[in-house]
Image (cartoon, rainbow, N blue to C red):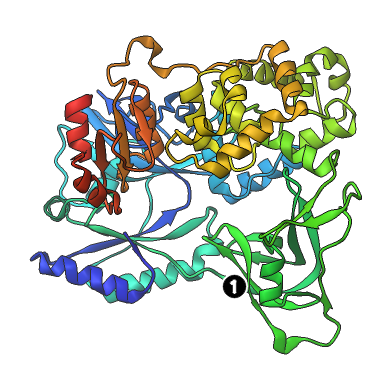
Amino acid sequence: SNAFSYDDLYAFNQRILKEGIEPEYVLEKKIDGLSVSLEYVNNIFVRGSTRGDGVFGENITNNLKTIPSIPLKLSHDEIIPYIEVRGEVYMDKDAFKKINEKAVETGDKEFANPRNAAAGSLRQLDPSITAKRKLKILIFNIQAIQGIILKTHSEALTFLQKIGFETNEIIVISKNLEQIIKGIEKIQIERHTYKHDIDGAVIKLNNLEDRRILGSTTKAPRWAIAYKYPPEQKETFVKDIFVQVGRTGVLTPNAIFDPVVVSGSKISKATLHNMDFIRENDIRINDRVIIQKAGDVIPEVVKILKEKRTGNEIIFNMPEKCPLCNSQIVKMEDKSAYKCIGINCIGQISRKLEHFCSKDAMDIEGLSTGIIDKLMNEGFIRTIDDIYNLHTNRDNLIKISGFGTKSIDKLLDAIEKSKNNNIDRLIFGLGIEHIGKKASSLIADKFKDINSIMTADELSFTEIDTIGLIMAKSIVQYFRNPEAVMLINNLKEKGINMNSLNYGKSGNSRLKGITFVITGSFENYSREELKYLITSMGANVTDSVSKKTNYLIVGDNPGSKVEKADKLGIKTLNIDEFKKTFL
């Protein structure tokens, strides 16, 4: 759980005292990275995953082996039959700066922050790429151990250091909560001098037996709490407001301001969302404003310092013509958005291509925003299907400044690999209005192939749970467009898969015909991971409870779905019951 004030910490302390425990606390920095689990058998590193649950964790063992601070063999005279530790993989600020400098040189998209850089590096398909990213790890807990008896967390960290791990630093050990709070304040003062980012401080019980007594919820341990610092705010000057053109033509206003360092990184722009936001807050060019990073990540304007206005402020109005293609801009009906109606708007085309290549769509590694813009400027791509013609221009591509034989061949391999994606990635990549990743997956599951999707009527789509009439109309209208039909035909000719790949093809389809709904949160895996496991056995997962639902899987803090399931007589299962019954 999280604490946002000292009152929250006092309440946490009272809950511990009510359990009859005289607490001794340890205080640590909360490293801003990616939490991983490392497992060792007989002192040898055998498995690493993004989560601690062996069923649901994403196996990234080979990538983790490239991190120098992860020992492949423990430095211990005696054999430890089994030990599982949890740590935070991170990228320090210097490494982050260098990786973004290189991205600028090569025309690749910069990482937003070190946490995203660390997560993206760990999930690379090629471990050699991960090895170049200079990742580090700090271990913060022993999850399980055989053959060794430890009584306290501080003792456990000392033991981990002796057998070869780098561990998170304990800032304070104390039975006095006031001393812990002083440590929290010390971290806040020093946080921007650290070589790595943090996203708070963690207070834990030191005694391991006390931890066992308190246990955990499905969401978090009862013996620990994370203190979240209030976002750092800075004053700056709005130099200009410009509009950005998205893939659907919608224009988003952005503020350009004097660069300021906020939460450890330099920022110079922030989204202003739409004209309603600008008018409601009366934001003007030449205003002085207060900015912060939402969640310590996304820059946002939180206050306009109207008392500092000089009379030189300029009211912003949406332009009448698109800044990229000079086409007419229109206000969308019943919405606060403005849209460029240019058919050949380069801004829209660029963002559509970027979306098509993105991780959740066709996942073409190497076709970043910068590379796409460069290829468009050189005349190599203009439409989605042009991507699959790039191999015919290999020799010319190599000659482009910043490219080379190795990078081009790697890009062409990624493009070729994308031809075998499941059709739901293609549907999502097309960028059909209102059709997101979830809807694309449901459509692929129902219709199985592109021809069935293109010829289906609105009623057929509304038969899918969570897809309403607006979404159904959107996809039907999309495939009635001759340009869309031509695009699909061109992609077919280039060998792109147009069928749904059945996850249960390997023979594991014993849950076929059963429909599950998931509610609440779970400690060891996300809903998407649970959904993947269920669908891989042939079952369906929908978002809402209905008469068609067979089981409701209930996690921590469930919503109204439980009550609805009870009314309909639908059986509910906790995660342990689900595993016992179906795995």
Residue 22 percent coordinates (x, y):
12, 67
User: Quadrant of the image for the N terminus?
Assistant: bottom left
Residue beneath the point at 64% across and 37% down: 432
Position of 115 relative to 393 (above/below): below
User: Quadrant of the image for the C terminus?
Assistant: top left
Residue 266 percent coordinates (x, y):
68, 60
* Count of numbered labels shown in the rendering: 1
Residue beneath the point at 45% across and 36% down: 69
Position of 333 relative to 567 (above/below): below
Residue 299 occupies which quadrant of the picture?
bottom right
Residue 444 percent coordinates (x, y):
51, 25
Give left or right: position of 516 versus 451: left
Residue beneath the point at 59% across and 72% down: 233
Residue 521 percent coordinates (x, y):
32, 47
Residue beneath the point at 11% across and 53% down: 213
Position of 45 relative to 277 (above/below): above
193 or 278, which lies in front?
Answer: 278
561 or 6, which lies in front?
Answer: 561
Position of 144 relative to 514 (above/below): below
Give left or right: position of 391 versus 517: right
- The answer, for residue 360, to whether it is visible in the render is yes
Q: Which residue is mark 1?
A: 233
Give left or right: position of 219 versus 492: left
Residue 180 occupies which quadrant of the picture?
bottom left
Instruction: Give the structural element (helix, strand or loop) at label 1.
Output: strand
Q: Alpha-carbon neighbours of circle 1 within 10 Å: few (<14), some, or many (≥20)?
A: some
501 or 299, which lies in front?
Answer: 501
| Residue type at the position of mark 1 | Gln
Give left or right: position of 225 versus 253: left
